[in-house]
Image (cartoon, rainbow, N blue to C red):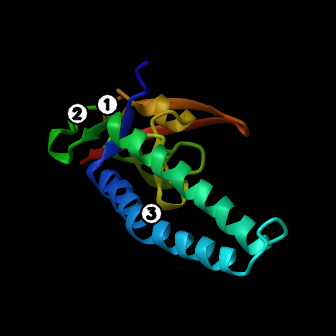
Amino acid sequence: MKGKEIILTLEGLKKIEDELEQLKTVRRREVAERIKQAIEFGDISENSEYEDAKNEQAFIEGRILTLEKMLRYAKIIDDENIDTGVVSIGSTVLLKDLEDGSEVKYTIVGSVEADPGANKISNESPVGKAILGQAKDSVVEVTVPAGQLKYQIMDILR
């Protein structure tokens, strides 16, 4: 069974690798020590500290598996290979809202890296889907839960 391709920028790849390293080297040891201490308290059947530590251990191991799977199916988008002629994953795009004239700059990333607060939007989001493959000066209409948005692509950068 093949997994879904995970699209990452080099920055996103580094973040995942760093988190994985932290979980494997630091967090695993910390939670193992918590479990050991809880066992030393005696009866573990009614020991909430032991239960909390075991739950945290399960979460950490699950997260490690998730991150390892992401890395296994990762497709890295290299900034150097980004075509600035059309919007693609990895592009930074300057959009002008044709309704109010405001401008916003988004970087198109894979869904794993999406962070709207940092203006990183997923290629699977409504805006991301609408602008992918479009050229500079194109006008796109985007259907969002609040209605229709109309943007003009002002610039495409790496």
The residue at the far top in this view is 1
Residue at 33%, 56% in the rendered image: 17
Position of residue 9 measured from the top left corner of the image (x, y, whole percent) = 30, 47
Residue 135 is tagged as 1
Residue 121 is tagged as none
Residue at 39%, 57% in the rendered image: 20
Q: How many marks?
A: 3
Q: Amino acid at mark 2?
A: Gly
Position of residue 138 measured from the top left corner of the image (x, y, whole percent) = 39, 31
Residue at 72%, 36% in the rendered image: 145
Mark earlier in primary sequence (1, 2): 2
Residue 23 is tagged as 3
Please identify the quarter of the rendering in which residue 19 is found.
bottom left
Q: Which circle, 2 or 3, is nearer the viewer?
A: 3
Please identify the quarter of the rendering in which residue 47 is found.
bottom right
Position of residue 45 measured from the top left corner of the image (x, y, whole percent) = 82, 65
Q: Is residue 156 left or right of residue 16?
A: left
Q: Is residue 14 left or right of residue 51?
A: left
* Marks 3 and 1, how far apart at CA: 42 Å
The residue at the far right in this view is 46
Residue at 56%, 34% in the rendered image: 126
- Element under label 1? loop
Which residue corresponds to mark 2? 85
